[in-house]
Amino acid sequence: MTFEQWTRLVLERVETALERYLPAETTEPAKLHEAMRYAVLGGGKRVRPLLCHAAGELTGARAECLDAAAAALEMIHVYSLVHDDMPCMDDDALRRGKPTVHVKYDEATALLVGDALQSQAFVVLTSDVLGAPQQASLVRELALASGSIGMCGGQAIDLASVGHTLTRPQLETMHRMKTGALLRAAVRMGALAGETPDEPALASLDAYAAAVGLAFQVVDDILDVTTDSATLGKTAGKDAKDGKPTYVSIIGLDASRALAAQLRSDAHAALAPFGARAQRLAELADLVVNRVS
C-alpha cells in the first residue's frame, strides 16, 4: 500500500468514527450538536489521527482502538481551534476554509461547542472498544496534553506574548506546549493502544514526536507569511498583524526553513530503532515539513 493509499484509508476510518462518536444533529439540543458536527466533520489535515494510527501500527493496536483514540484527539484539537478563533482570543473569521463557529452561529454556541467536544473526547476514550487499562492510560495522556502544562498552558503563554519579544528558547517552550503536547499525545496514545512499548521505545517515540511537533509549528509560521488565505484555509498574515512572536519574526524565513528541514532529519533519526516498521511515521514527518517545499 502506498502512503497516499494508507492516508486515504485512515482518513476514511477517522471520518466514520467521528460521525459515529459525535451526537446526531437531530438530538436535543439540536443547535449545539449541529455546530459540533459543523466544527469537526469534513475538514482539516487530521495530522493527529494519522500519527495515532501510524504509531499504533508499531505496537499491533487494533484498528477499532486507534479509531477511538484518533477521534478523541481530533475532538480535543477542534475544541481548541473553536475557542482559539473566538473574539476573546485570536478573533478569526476563517477556519478550514469556512466561517469559524462563532461567526457561523454565535459566541455562546462556540464556547459550548468547545466545552462539549472536550467532554465528548473522554466519553469516546471510555467506550467499550478499549479495555480498562487502556482507557486509564489514554485518558491520562490526553488530559495531561490538553491541560495547563500542555495545550492550554501554551495558549496562555501565547496570549500573554502578543506585542512582546520572546527569546528562541521561550518561543520553543510555548510551542512545545501549545502545539507539540497534543501531537506527542497522538503518538503515545497510538502506541499505548496496542502492546505497551518498553521505555526505550517510548523514549524514541517521544523524541520523534518532539521533532515533528516543533516542525509542524515552524512550518505553520512559514506558511503564515508565504501563503494566501484561500490556500491556508485560515487568515494569512494574522500573526504578524497581531504582533505575535513566531519563528519567522525571531530567526527569519530562511533560517526557519532550515530549522524545519533539520527537525525532519531529527524525526527520522529518532525512528532508527524501529527500522522499516516506522515507515508511516517517517512519511508523516515528511508530510509535515514538505508543506513548505
Image (cartoon, rainbow, N blue to C red):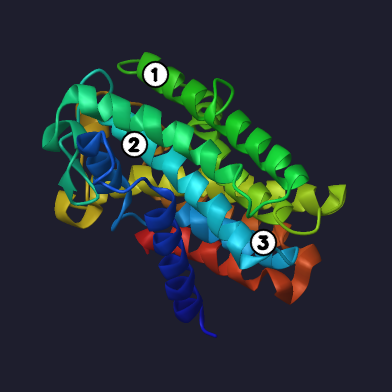
> Residue 262 placed where, x, y %?
57, 54
Kindly identify which residue carries mark 2.
81
The amino acid pointed to by label 2 is: Leu
Determine whether the residue tagged by mark 1 lies in a helix, strand or loop.
loop
> Residue 212 placed where, x, y %?
56, 51
The foreground one among 71 and 252 is 71
The foreground one among 224 and 136 is 136
Image quadrant in which you'd find residue 76: top left
> Residue 251 placed where, x, y %?
42, 36
In this picture, residue 220 sits left or right of residue 99: right
Kindly identify which residue carries mark 3.
56
Q: Of the residues under marks 3 and 2, which one precedes in the sequence?
A: 3
Q: CA distance from mark 3 to mark 2?
A: 25 Å
Which circle marks residue 165 in the picture? 1
- Image quarter of the C terminus: bottom left
Q: CA distance from mark 3 to mark 1?
A: 39 Å
Image quadrant in which you'd find residue 136: top right
Q: Report if residue 142 is visible in the image.
A: yes
Q: Residue at x 53, y 39 (%)?
A: 123
The foreground one among 3 and 164 is 3
